[in-house]
Amino acid sequence: MVLSRMQALLAQLYDAPVDHQVQDYLITERAQLVQLLGADASPTSDEQVFLVEDAQGVRVGLFIDASVLERLRGRDPLAALDETNLADYCTALEGVSHFHYLMWNLTRNRRVSLLELELQAEVDKYASALTLMTRQRGGYFPAMLHARLFHHVAFLPCLDAAARRRYEEANRHAARYCRELEERYLRSRRQRPEAWVAELRRFFRRGHQEKIRQLVV
């Protein structure tokens, strides 16, 4: 399953495995999402991580629309990631990122803010896509990826003002952070991809306030 392989990619990139597998928490039908969440179900988003309360307590779930997964099965991004499947890859990877990061923190009794989830997902989309594209292209650096992911974007019109600000802030901070790492470790005369990975792993483990303090300095 492509989502399980995406989760394995993040776990390897950050050296942060979790025992919970995304496939076991997945739903793909919007009607089921509405049944679980009611008015809290996003009417237009193809991806949503959610928490529901049942007899066993609070349960985490992930919705990714079946049409997204069908297209990814037809054009596997882990075999060849390009403009034809990049949008669907980012949709699915965002959901996997939310799930994986939430589980990683919950097992450590750490709180996670909504901004922190979105910020980490923005970094994850870029870092994982860069890893795949570089590997698939024999080490060739995808120079246009940063602009494609951080500048050529649009936000859902149904977002309320608070949610839109959160997405815009996450996009802005992640764009700056990823550009700085790119210039420092991947575009310099002496490339140091291992240092790039080490910094990403440190960032992954920082809490919300630590992340924000680092990014606004």
Image: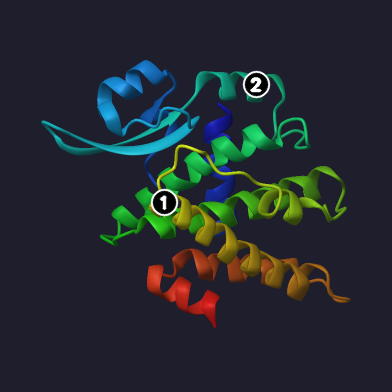
**Residue 157 or residue 117, whichever sits in front:** 157
Q: Residue furthest left?
A: 55
Position of residue 2 measured from the top left corner of the image (x, y, whole percent): 58, 30
In the displayed structure, 23 sits above or below 147; it is above
Amino acid type for the residue under numbered disc 2:
Arg
The amino acid marked with disc number 1 is: Ala
Q: Which residue is rendered at x = 52% and y = 70% of the image?
A: 202
**Is residue 177 visible to us here?**
yes
Q: Is residue 16 visible?
A: no
Q: Position of residue 213 (x, y in %)?
A: 46, 78
From this view, report whether residue 49 is shown above or below residue 143.
above
Query: In terms of secondary structure, where does tag 2 sit?
Result: helix
How far is disc 2 from disc 1 in space, using C-alphas?
A: 31 Å
Please give left or right for residue 159 compared with residue 11 in the image. left
- Total marks shown come to 2
Residue 71's label in the rendered image is 2
Quarter-wise, where is residue 34 in the image? top left
> Callout 1: 10 Å neighbours few (<14), some, many (20+)?
few
Residue assigned mark 1: 161
Q: Is residue 76 above or below residue 93?
A: above
**Residue at image x 30%, y 54%?**
106
Q: Position of residue 122 (x, y in %)?
A: 56, 54
| Image quadrant where residue 42 sits | top left
Residue depicted at 87% across the width and 48% down the height? 138
Determine which of the numbered discs, if any, sits on residue 174 in the image.
none
Please rate how many residues cluster around mark 2, counting C-alpha atoms within 10 Å: few if below 14, some from 14 to 19, many from 20: some
